[in-house]
Image: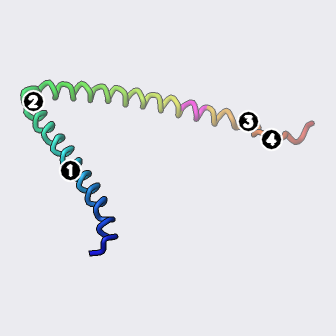
Amino acid sequence: MNPEAVAVLIPVVLFGGFFSWMIARTVSKAYTAKLQAGGQAGTTGEARQEELATALEEVRREVAELAERVDFTERLLAKGRDGEAGKLAPGERRTGST
């Protein structure tokens, strides 16, 4: 085998191996944490469900508030458009009586 090719492959194999090891380690830690959390979640399933219901009600309240704000903004914009019909655009001059 060509010595120059081996010289290139050595760092590639080292870095590839290192990053593969780190990825496998991270995935195994995440899987272990998920399994441990799953065991604890079984005892506090009702508490988790109550927490999710509370969060859902909070989101519903915020969406309703945002809908009110959108309606208010639409009314202001519509009122602004109706009021601009008689105004001149910037740079326009009235013709007729000067």
**Which residue is identified by label 1?**
21
Question: For the residue carrying disc 2, how many other residues have a C-alpha within 10 Å: few (<14), some (14-19), or many (20+)?
Answer: few
Q: Nearer the viewer, mark 4 or mark 3?
A: 4
Q: Nearer the viewer, mark 4 or mark 1?
A: 1
Residue closest to the eye, 20 or 36:
20
Disc 2 marks which amino acid? Answer: Gln
Q: Secondary structure at mark 4?
A: loop
Identified at 81% across, 41% down, the residue is 92
**Which residue is identified by label 3?**
86
Q: How far, Cα to Cα, is label 2 from label 4? A: 70 Å
Which mark sits nearer the N-terminus, 3 or 2?
2
Q: Nearer the viewer, mark 1 or mark 3?
A: 1
Residue closest to the eye, 4 or 30:
4
Q: Name the quarter where the N terminus is drawn.
A: bottom left
Disc 4 marks which amino acid? Answer: Gly
Which mark sits nearer the N-terminus, 4 or 1?
1
Report x, y in % for residue 60.
Answer: 32, 29
Query: Which of the 4 quarters of the picture holds residue 29?
Result: top left
The residue stretch that appears in magenta: 75-79
Where residue 40 is drawn, which disc sits there?
A: 2
Q: Are marks 2 and 4 in contact (CB under 8 Å)?
A: no
Identified at 54% across, 31% down, the residue is 75
Identified at 31% across, 59% down, the residue is 11
